[in-house]
């Protein structure tokens, strides 16, 4: 409980021993806490740094452990001061980061005139599109003529799923050839379950993205997608882009039955937790692999168990499998 103050279990054990046996030597303290003498010396040095072990004013050669009400309260106040300073530095860093981001956007944009941005190279275009997607408020539509392969990202890492989690309305038209890829089919199915609308058509003219029906993103050269992209904000161009999208959307076929969409879809984290649990992973492993806290991992597992009315990990796996979630 005192770790936020820099007092771990071993340090507290020595501190408690010094409080309980104020006249004990380091050797005696080592026996009390059942630790090597060298460790006790190190832990006592830590207590000195924390100002929990200080010289005795009546005996310059002696030391005593500071009363917890004084020592720990003072330590908490110092830590609070340090945290406030760090928070101020963090806020300043955030402001600097935003300035750098804007400067970087200018570097990504090779030239811009009015409502048009031209981004050279696939990498520059992808980074800019990801940034714009983060600012989407309502909708994200796309014509995606890419041929899918096994290089698709894992579901929980996809920016598409992050948009769906935020409640952005997504409409995507793929090529019908994507059905040849099992992974692409699963990817599209997950989009559908999370609330995205997915259709397919035999041909598409080019890649087209439309954000909030306010800006359209098209490739610099439809025949060479690696050249970069052009971002249009002019009303006329966006209107043409929306009309083009609507034309292909209206004649594309539904890939899934709309009634199959889950009323309570899985989030990407929930889907990955289920996959890991089905593979036999423990809560600690799930937390480590997903970069979340153990408490969060257990909360997700408990929420899934409640949704599926599962009383055990086994029942959870069976119920998830019946729904096609794993």
Image: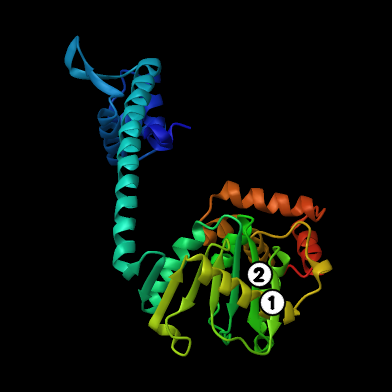
- Say whether disc 1 or disc 2 marks the residue closer to the N-terminus: 2
- Looking at this view, name the residue that lies furthest to the top: 58
Measured along the vertical axis of the image, is residue 145 above or below residue 270?
below
Q: Are marks 1 and 2 in contact (CB under 8 Å)?
A: yes
Gap between marks 1 and 2 measured at Cα: 9 Å
> Where residue 171 is drawn, which disc sits there?
2
Is residue 261 in sight in this rendering? Answer: yes
> Where residue 169 is drawn, which disc sits there?
none
Left or right: residue 252 versus residue 121 is right
Q: Secondary structure at mark 2?
A: strand
Q: Depth check: give the residue in front, 91 or 225.
A: 225
> Where residue 249 is drawn, which disc sits there?
1
Measured along the vertical axis of the image, is residue 52 above or below residue 198?
above
Left or right: residue 207 versus residue 167 is left
Left or right: residue 41 versus residue 172 is left
Q: Quadrant of the C terminus?
A: bottom right
* Residue at the (80%, 65%) spot, across then down: 318
* Residue at the (64%, 89%) spot, across then down: 203
Q: Depth check: give the residue in front, 268 or 197.
A: 197
């Amino acid at each position: 409980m005192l770790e936020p103050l820099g007092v771990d279990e071993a340090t507290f054990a020595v501190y408690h021993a010094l409080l309980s046996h104020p006249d004990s030597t380091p050797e005696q303290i080592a026996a009390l806490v059942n630790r090597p003498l060298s460790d006790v010396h190190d832990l006592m040095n830590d207590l000195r740094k924390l100002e929990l072990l200080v010289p005795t004013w009546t005996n310059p050669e002696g030391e005593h452990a500071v009363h917890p009400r004084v020592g720990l309260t003072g330590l908490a106040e110092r830590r609070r001061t340090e945290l406030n300073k760090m928070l101020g530095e963090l806020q300043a860093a955030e402001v600097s980061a935003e300035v750098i981001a804007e400067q970087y956007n200018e570097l990504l944009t090779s030239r811009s005139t009015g409502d048009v941005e031209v981004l050279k190279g696939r990498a520059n275009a992808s980074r800019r599109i990801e940034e714009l997607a983060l600012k989407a408020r309502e909708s994200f539509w796309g014509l995606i003529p890419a041929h899918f392969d096994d290089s698709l990202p894992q579901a929980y890492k996809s920016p598409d799923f992050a948009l769906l989690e935020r409640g952005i309305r997504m409409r995507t038209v793929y090529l019908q050839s994507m059905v040849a890829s099992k992974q692409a089919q699963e990817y599209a199915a997950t989009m559908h379950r999370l609330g995205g609308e997915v259709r397919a058509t035999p041909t598409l003219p080019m890649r087209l993205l439309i954000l909030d029906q306010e800006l359209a993103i098209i490739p610099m050269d439809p025949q060479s997608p690696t050249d970069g992209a052009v971002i249009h904000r002019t009303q006329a161009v966006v209107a043409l882009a929306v009309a083009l999208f609507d034309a292909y959307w209206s004649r594309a076929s539904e890939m899934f039955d709309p009634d199959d969409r889950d009323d309570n879809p899985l989030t990407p984290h929930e889907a990955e937790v289920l996959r890991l649990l089905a593979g036999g992973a423990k809560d600690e492993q799930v937390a480590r692999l997903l970069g979340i806290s153990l408490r969060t991992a257990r909360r997700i597992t408990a929420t899934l168990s409640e949704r599926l009315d599962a009383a055990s990990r086994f029942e959870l796996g069976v119920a998830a499998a019946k729904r096609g979630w794993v």
